[in-house]
Amino acid sequence: MMSKLRFDGRVVVVTGAGAGLGRVYALLFASKGAKVVVNDLGSSRHGDGASRVADTVVTEIKSQGGQAVANYDNVLDGDKIIKTAIDSFGRIDVLVNNAGILRDKSFARMSDADWDIIQNVHVKGAMRTTKAAWPYFKQQKYGKIIFTSSNSGLYGNFGQANYSSAKMALVGLANTLAIEGQSSGINTNVIVPTAGSRLTEDIVPPDFFQQLKPELIAPVVVWLCHENCTENGSIIESALGWAGKCHLIRSNGCILRKSINDSVTPEDVRDNWDKVTDMSNAKHCDSIAEATGELMNVVEQLSSRKADDSSSSSLFNPKYTMKYSYNIKDVILYALGVGATTKNPSDFQYLYENHENFSAVPSYFVIFGPLGALCSDMFSTALPNAENVNLAGVLHGEQYLKVLKKIPTEANVETRFRIQETLDKEKMAVMLIEHETYDVDSGDKLSVGQMVGVIKGAGGFGGPRNSKYEIPLVDAPKRKPDASVTQQTCVDQAAIYRLGSDDMNPLHIDESIAAMGGFEKPILHGLCSLGFATRHVLRMFADNDTELFDSVKARFVKPVIPGQTLRTDMWRDCKRIYFQTTVVENNSPVIAGAYIDLKDVKLGTQNSKL
């Protein structure tokens, strides 16, 4: 059984904590060992009057053996609230921006004062309090921030133009702070609660009000603020003991003009409006870089069209595509290629089609990245100085893969590729290639990934050194691994993997070709080593439940010789498992900066050696 969550040594500031949600947050944090600053101006839900409600909550916390102090400053004086934490407890670790008021009126009857007071309390107040805490978070490389939004902000609500706009503004603020704070260990998230409080009293029916218990939402907020929670930049809605993640999505859209030289008319928009608004294959963009990058693909498509081409095209239709069909035998052969063996009972689900949990090793879809990229003219057309470069020296430097739907054990798929950017690293060029794999029959997107190709001797062309498209690697924690699995590869490992992945590069089997590449012997595919590590992580932290796999990111450091022994060291941080793979015989890391994100954790019970 896993240990209970604690906040010992942590200092938490909760604004608007004199009643309702804020009070319950403060009580729960304190019961978990946190020192709490209970802030509340003591006003009514309309922002009128004042009372000493924070003292009551502090007394309640202390009566239960907790530590807390009261603060009565307005959130517009957020620096004073944070100063209370520093003066009283010497630090701040968590800030829950919960304070809020209502001034409901229809838009036509709303005064400037009605508008301004809502914006001040909800947006400017949360901003000022957060800005005061930000330097402390940056200095200590740790901080958890919660902004409180509302269903009125996400969906709108009659009579709440001021309130809903403020609540949606907080979502935008949180999105940006999640990006700016990530490198400093600062996580920012949004809670969208529906709870019985002084803001909702007399607004919802009494019977329903009784079910909207703040105590059912507080645990969600407390988890988001715990050091083991890696969630960042998310909108979490919660009510009635339920919680779910929200995000914005957009349709695939439609190109409205025929070529790069054409304009767009209102009639073009009218004639394509059904496609513009078709949400059947809508997707979520994880960043502004991804959203902008996909729009840039429109220019590529338009540039390649003929002026008289009247066909309409989906927005996301990359220039390079590869169709591929695989069946149960291919999935099993891949599993053998990445070390699955009948000697290990937990591998049987990858090797026997009649097994009740028969499934593909989730890393299977990484093969379509290099398979399609290396079979096209992608590298030669994207490099400014390709004619002077030996493209046989292209190396697979890094790989990212996110699985969107359970990988079928047989399917007809199409992988679409897009060059995101080519970077100039002086002595080498680095190409970022996005690949998305779709089920041809259903149209479902199954996975999205990024392959990083390294081309030696291709640098120096004056291109950018860094890119907004880069998916960062993360160093493993500097502590003893939480789990390790050791497994020896067989001398025929590369030969088997060639068949299971269709990567027939002779570098992995022909000694003369390997020698030309500077290797004493044929080497193992980097993606093969990644397949070993994926299996090891799933065995130890997902109990071999492949549906718990979400994504993987890894950098290939050094080659492996077939027959050598691989050790995968793993560190758990909530649902993220950091890992590093090392050759045991020479203690040389071969995969580094790597992690696998899981949808949930199920601790395995297998031995650490195979």
Image (spheres, helix red, strand yellow):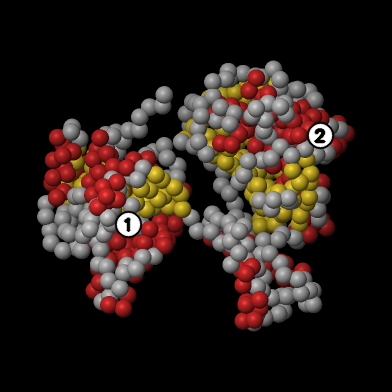
Q: Nearer the viewer, residue 195 or 361?
A: 195
Vertical order, 481 against 591 (above or below): above
For label 2, count other residues whose C-alpha is less than 10 Å away and answer few (under 14), some (14-19) or many (20+).
Answer: some
- In the rendered image, the residue lying farthest to the right is 512
Vertical order, 513 against 470 (above or below): above
- Residue at the disc numbered 2: 499
Determine the residue positioned at 62% across, 18% down.
609
Vertical order, 315 against 424 (above or below): below
Residue kind at label 2, given as amino acid type: Leu
Using the rendered view, name the quadrant where residue 550 is placed. Answer: top right
Element type at mark 1? helix
For label 1, count other residues whose C-alpha is less than 10 Å away and answer few (under 14), some (14-19) or many (20+).
Answer: some
Which of the labelled discs sits on residue 272, or is there none?
Answer: none
Determine the residue positioned at 18% across, 33% down.
64
Using the rendered view, name the quadrant where residue 163 is placed. Answer: bottom left
In the rendered structure, the answer to whether residue 489 lies left or right of residue 166 reads right
Percent position of residue 318, x then y: 71, 59
Q: Nearer the viewer, residue 153 or 573?
A: 153
Q: Nearer the viewer, residue 199 or 341?
A: 199
Determine the residue positioned at 74% across, 31% down.
332
What separation in Å lies between label 1 and label 2 (alpha carbons)?
A: 56 Å
Image quadrant containing the N terminus: top left
In the rendered structure, the answer to whether residue 264 lies left or right of residue 482 reads right
Q: Can see residue 234?
A: no
Element type at mark 2? helix
Image quadrant containing the C terminus: top right
- Residue at the disc numbered 1: 131
Percent position of residue 425, x then y: 66, 52
In the rendered structure, the answer to whether residue 491 lies left or right of residue 421 reads right
Which one is earlier in the sequence, the residue at label 1 or at label 2?
1
Determine the residue positioned at 47% across, 29% down.
479
